[in-house]
Amino acid sequence: MHRFIIAVLSIMVTVFLSAQTKHSKISAHHFNYKGFATTIEDDAQDENGNHLLVGEIRVIEEQEKKRDTVINKIFNLTQVYSRDRLGIIIVTDSNYNTIKIRRSFNGKKVIYDEASKQFFIGANFFDYIKVDDNSFSAWQPVIIKTNLELASEIYFLRKDYSCILQDMRLEKDRILLFTRSTNNEILKKRKEKVEVIAVSTENIKEDTTGARIKNFEALLTQESSFESGRVTITDVSKFNNSYYFATSTLDQFKLTNSIHLYEFKNDRIIEVKIFPKFIQYAMRYDGWMHLNNGYVDSKSNYYILVHKAATKEKITLIKTDTIFRQFAVKNIPLNDYAEMNDFLVLRNGNLVLLSINEKGNWSYYIYTDKMELLQEIKTTLYRKYRPMRIKESGGNQLTCLFTVDMTTKNDCVVHRVDLR
């Protein structure tokens, strides 16, 4: 009888481990070019699985012979005078085999629109602006409409201040841009705000210089109040007809921060006033906090990943609803600083938390919608790698983009994680 129980337990353990192995399949794809450091910010795929990746590339070797000859030719880098980050587009097949590379603007977001069979890239470009008697440089948003052959249409949005694209959403007849904007001041006078700007490729104005440049005429602009310091915006999520995003603002001189939640609905940006006090109450803490990310799912559940500043102790996952009637809190122990941790709500309601494990490598932790741990999927990427974006792709898969920028290593890795 004793042997029978042991045998049964052995079979159960074998089945369990087999299931863990089946669910833990990761394929890693590297985008490394000699003499360059590459950062991929986003990745989208069409209905055939082809990928279009956007981001930026930086020269780290001043001598031309020490750099990848193909990239040198594409970017026309015969001489290098600075270490500016240059925009890059990479087209691959379904297995991330490179098909095309093109110089572009500094890509932040890419969305594939199946109806038009086009990719829409949200990016930023460095512009020189003159306001009255003042001239200065500033970042401005740009939208690129393209296909796998990279036949592109480019649309600029010009402001008289630095306006940096953070996220983007496609609607039926317009594009929503979520940006952080500055007052163009520096140091202690610097202030930033969030803007939601609606544009359309059908509503453009001619460039006054006579060049063949397409400039957006903004359909509407909604903005938050200015705050001292730099604004960090979480990913934008949508429930019914509302878009939700949260912000953290850090004032480095006063060493203070503030957090806010905004709803964009009926072309208005509305602050959810209860949010800061709610976070303090849920955390049982009223000090300096940082929002890692936040998502609203299809059932009106709002998940927030938040931590105390500069902590290695724990990170907190909060589940509530969009009117904050009830909530649940899960404190998750940490093995490293919490700043780079991220999470995602999957279409099936489960959650994926990306965090450093006890061996110092990144792991994907799968939780139920009740925040119960289902599984840990371990990777071999050590803590120096920085996750840029985690997203759900087709066929029960995750895509996660990592980068590392060190003295001895400059690497860009795309993980494809099979959850089946």
Image: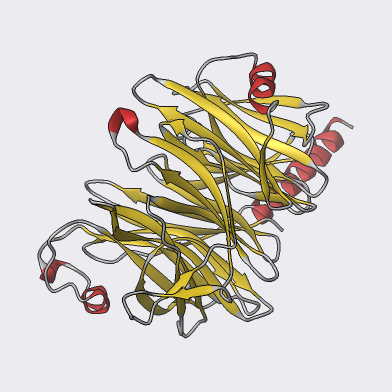
Q: Is residue 353 visible?
A: yes
Q: Is residue 361 visible?
A: no
Estimate the x, y position of residue 17 in percent, counting from the top left. Answer: 69, 46
Q: How many marks?
A: 0
When the figure is inspected, residue 231 is found, relative to residue 69, above or below; the finding is above
Residue found at the far right of this picture:
1
Residue closest to the eye, 283 or 49: 283
When the figure is inspected, residue 337 is found, relative to residue 99, above or below; the finding is above
Q: Quadrant of residue 355?
A: top right
Q: Quadrant of residue 326?
A: top right
Colouring scheme, one of rainbow, by chain, secondary structure, one colour = secondary structure
Residue closest to the eye, 286 or 193: 193
- Judge from the rendering whether residue 289 lies leftward or rightward of residue 405; answer left or right: right
Estimate the x, y position of residue 185 in percent, counting from the top left. Answer: 31, 38
Estimate the x, y position of residue 313 in percent, counting from the top left. Answer: 52, 20
The residue located at (59%, 62%) in the rendering is 219
Q: Quadrant of residue 277?
A: top right
**Quarter containing the C terminus:** bottom right
- Judge from the rendering whether residue 321 lies leftward or rightward of residue 160; answer left or right: right
Residue found at the far front of this picture:
132
The residue located at (38%, 19%) in the rendering is 254
- Judge from the rendering whether residue 38 lies leftward or rightward of residue 117; answer left or right: left
- Judge from the rendering whether residue 238 lies leftward or rightward of residue 124; answer left or right: right
**Quarter containing the N terminus:** top right
The residue located at (33%, 81%) in the rendering is 210
Estimate the x, y position of residue 275 in percent, counting from the top left. Answer: 67, 28
The residue located at (14%, 67%) in the rendering is 66
